[in-house]
Amino acid sequence: MLDILHDLGIDLSTLIIQMIGFAVLFFVLRKYVFGIIAQAIEDRKRDIRDRMAGLDADRAELDRLHEEARRRLEEIETEAREKMQAAVDQANAERGRILEETQQAADRELEKARNTIRREKEHAVKELRAQVGDLAVEIAGRVLNSTLDAAEHRKVVDEFIAQIPSSKE
C-alpha cells in the first residue's frame, strides 16, 4: 500500500501531519466557531419564527379589524336606512296632518260660506217680503183710493207677510 501511495505522489508522514492538523483545526472550529455559527443560525431561526408568529398575529388582527370595520359599516348603513325610513314616515305623517288641517280649514270655510249665503238669502227674502208688502199696500191703496197711516200700513204688511208661505215650508 505504501507503494501505491508513493506511486500517487503521496507522502505518508505528510498525510498524517495533515490529518492531525485537520483534526486540531476541526476541534478548534467546533469549539469556537461552529458553536457561535450554530447559535447565530438558531437565533436567526428563532427570530424568523417570532416574526412569522408576529405576522400571523398581525394578519389575524388585520382580519379582525377588517371584519369589525365591515360589520360597523353594515350597522351604519342599517342605521342610515332606518333614519331615512323614519324621515320618510315622519314626512308622510306631516303631509297627512297638513292635508287633514287643510281639509278641515276648507270645510270650515265652506261652512262659513254656506252660513253667509243662508244669512244673505234670509235677508234678501225679508227685504223681498217687505217690498212685496209695500207694493201690496200701495196697490190696495190705489184700488181703494185711500191711503193708510203708518200703523195701519205696518199691520197690513205683517198680516200679508204672515200669509206668504215661508221658504222653509
Image (cartoon, rainbow, N blue to C red):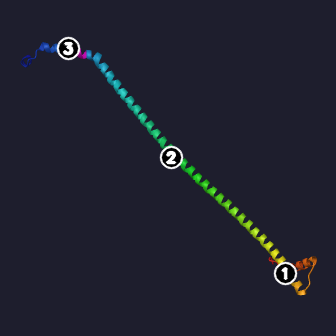
Looking at the rendered structure, the secondary structure element under dot 3 is helix
Amino acid beneath label 3 = Gly
* Number of the front mark, 3 or 1: 1
Task: Give the overall secondary structure of the magenta segment.
Answer: helix
Q: Are marks 3 and 1 in contact (CB under 8 Å)?
A: no
Q: Residues within 10 Å of mark 2 (few under 14, many from 20)?
A: few
Numbered mark located on residue 21 in the image: 3
Among numbered discs 1 and 2, the one appearing first in the sequence: 2
State left or right for residue 149 relative to residue 9. Answer: right
Q: Which residues are magenta?
A: 22-27
Among numbered discs 3 and 1, the one appearing first in the sequence: 3
Residue that carries the numbered disc 1 in the rendered image: 135
Amino acid beneath label 2 = Glu
Where is residue 124 shown, x and y percent of the image?
79, 74
Where is residue 69 shown, x and y percent of the image?
48, 41
Where is residue 147 shown, x and y percent of the image?
91, 82
Numbered mark located on residue 74 in the image: 2
Amino acid beneath label 1 = Leu
Looking at the rendered structure, the secondary structure element under dot 2 is helix
Is 65 drawn above or below residue 39 in the view shown?
A: below
Between residue 145 and residue 69, name the one nearer to us: 145
